[in-house]
Amino acid sequence: MSQIIKNKIEMYDLLRQGLLGNTLESYATFQEITRIPHWTKGRWAVREAGNVSGGKFITGVKAGCLRKQIHKNFGERPINISRQLDNKLCLLQAEIYDDYMMYSTYPGFFRTAMQYAKHSFSACGTRSILKAYCDQPSYENIERLQEKYPDHVIEITVYAIPIGIYKWNTLFWEVRQY
């Protein structure tokens, strides 16, 4: 049965629960992060999780600066916080809508990568590219999401290594209507 994700807040809630596929562990508040082991190690990325397209995001934030940066950049607006990843491990980044796909092999931030995007307009071309890069559970999840959420865009990044909560090679960033 098909469903609709009404807004970004709902989408992030589903994402944090792992219901949209493989993702990074992510958090809605600074207080949630302080409860996890080793939260002070590494760098963090924070993005606006409200009902805005192309919302603000900051990356590479040290744990000691995280609370201040969240307050300075986002105030009380809804956010999504996750670990900062090494972009050198990116193989493919894509926005998938039915049989159409914008994709890039540029190993940078998603928004930057999409500036170098190529296009696939056929089911055969899109499926061939996805099968070449995604591991089987990731590819099957794309098909499941397209069936469950028709007319939604799926944003993914494929990595050279297993990553995320399910240890697939693909992270699912967004599933929503534009």
Image (cartoon, rainbow, N blue to C red):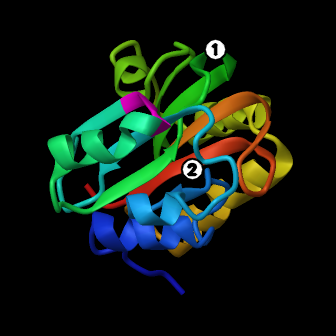
- Taking the spot 58% from the left edge, 41% from the top edge, the residue there is 40
Q: Which x, y percent locates residue 114?
A: 38, 23
For marks 2 and 1, the one nearer the N-term is: 1
- Taking the spot 44% from the left edge, 51% from the top edge, the residue there is 81
Q: Which residue is mark 1?
A: 88
Q: Relative to residue 163, is residue 103 drawn left or right?
A: left
Magenta-span inclusion, residue 175: no
Q: Which x, y percent locates residue 16?
A: 53, 66
Query: Dots 2 and 1: beta carbons under 8 Å?
Result: no
Examine the rendered structure and indicate whether residue 165 appears above or below residue 170: below
Q: Relative to residue 36, is residue 50 drawn left or right?
A: left
Q: Quadrant of residue 29?
A: bottom left
- Taking the spot 73% from the left edge, 50% from the top edge, the residue there is 138
Prevailing secondary structure class for the magenta stretch in the rendered image: strand
> Around disc 1, counting alpha carbons within 10 Å, would you say few (fewer than 14), some (14 to 19), or many (20 or more)?
few
Examine the rendered structure and indicate whether residue 138 appears above or below residue 87: below
Checking the image for residue 172, the label placed there is 2
Q: Which x, y percent locates residue 107?
A: 55, 15
**Amino acid tagged 2:** Phe
Checking the image for residue 6, the label placed there is none
Q: Quadrant of the C terminus?
A: bottom left
Q: Quadrant of residue 1?
A: bottom right
> Around disc 2, counting alpha carbons within 10 Å, would you say few (fewer than 14), some (14 to 19), or many (20 or more)?
many
- Taking the spot 16% from the left edge, 42% from the top edge, the residue there is 72
Q: Secondary structure at mark 2?
A: strand
For residue 154, say whether it is visible: no
**Amino acid tagged 1:** Lys
Q: Relative to residue 21, is residue 7 drawn left or right?
A: left
Chain part drawn in magenta? 59-63
Q: Relative to residue 48, is residue 173 drawn left or right?
A: right
Q: Quadrant of residue 175?
A: bottom left
